[in-house]
Image (cartoon, rainbow, N blue to C red):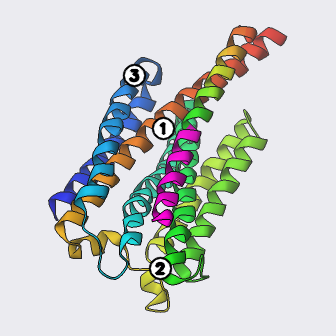
Amino acid sequence: MSWVLAAYAVTAVALLGYMLHLRAARSAALRDLERGG
Amino acid sequence: MTPQSFAVVVSVVAGVAWLLWLTSKFDSRIATARWPGALALALVPLWLALVVYYAPLEEAQGIFQKIFYVHIPAIIPMYTGFALCAVGGALYLRTRDERWDHLAVASAEVGVLFCTLMLVVGPIWAKPVWGHWWVWDLRLTSTLMLWFIYVAYLFLRTFAFGSDTARTFTAVYGIAGTAAIPFVYYAVKIAAGSTMHPSNPASESGGLPPEMGRTVAIGMVAFIWIFAWLVAKRLELASLQARALVASRIGSA
């Protein structure tokens, strides 16, 4: 059972982690845009 | 073609068509990205419920076979991402429009994410079933090579950000990289019995019990729309970064 949970947990962490990374990078890009503009 | 396969094919075609439509007039169409996101959010709980309550336990592997429902759905977004990277690269070479270059990078990055998931989840399944985390057979090794090809693509992009030469070179590289896809897909047939990896799930799914087939198909459709949504969000980021770069150049001039 723990192998199965590990597989699903890894998937959830990877997808959520990537979404959070995109959100953080978007905020940083918006800040850069405000500074540059 | 079974109804499950039909649903998966329709989702792939619709997802790719939507991404191309979105990229062609990105600024006025990015608001539509909420729909793939909403669809994926609705499908994920359904898929998980089917995995837990609906799909039967497989006789030989028992509970470990449940990993099948998360390993297999990652395949289509991986291949779609790498194929779209080539399409974006080709359209960039033809039009020199930066938006197609953004599509190529976004697709490659999300494709690598799903390829990484396959390469991590696969060994978690293999260890209790095969007794090994990894075997250097043709399917696993060629998938690892595919992962390296597109990780190298992303490194190239990172180190040469904003350069037109880098865009042109990586567009050609992305197109050439797709040559590895058929090799990986048919690796099991090429290996002809010398591999421990099961044959291609697309051709195998017809032999699955209907409950398993429906569960994995819902998982595939959910992952396709997660992929489309992530590519759209990555496209938005690339567009913002490009605008920030232009603004900083104007500001410093």
Give the x, y percent position of residue B126.
51, 75
Quarter of the image for residue A19 reads top right
Give the x, y percent position of residue B42.
30, 37
Q: Which residues are magenta?
A: A1-18
The 10 Å Cα crowd at callout 3, few under 14, some 14 to 19, many 20 or more, is few
Amino acid type of the residue tagged 2 in the rendering: Val
Res. B129 mark: 2
Q: Is residue B89 magenta?
A: no
| Chain at numbered mark 3 | B
Q: Secondary structure at mark 3?
A: helix
Q: Main secondary structure of the magenta part?
A: helix
Q: CA distance from mark 3 to mark 1?
A: 15 Å
Give the x, y percent position of residue B31.
40, 20
Q: For the N terminus of chain B, which image quadrant?
A: bottom left
Q: Residue at (33%, 29%) from the top-left corner?
A: B35
Between disc 3 and disc 1, whose residue precedes?
A: 3
Disc 3 vs disc 1: which is toward the camera?
Answer: 1
Quarter of the image for residue B145 reads bottom right
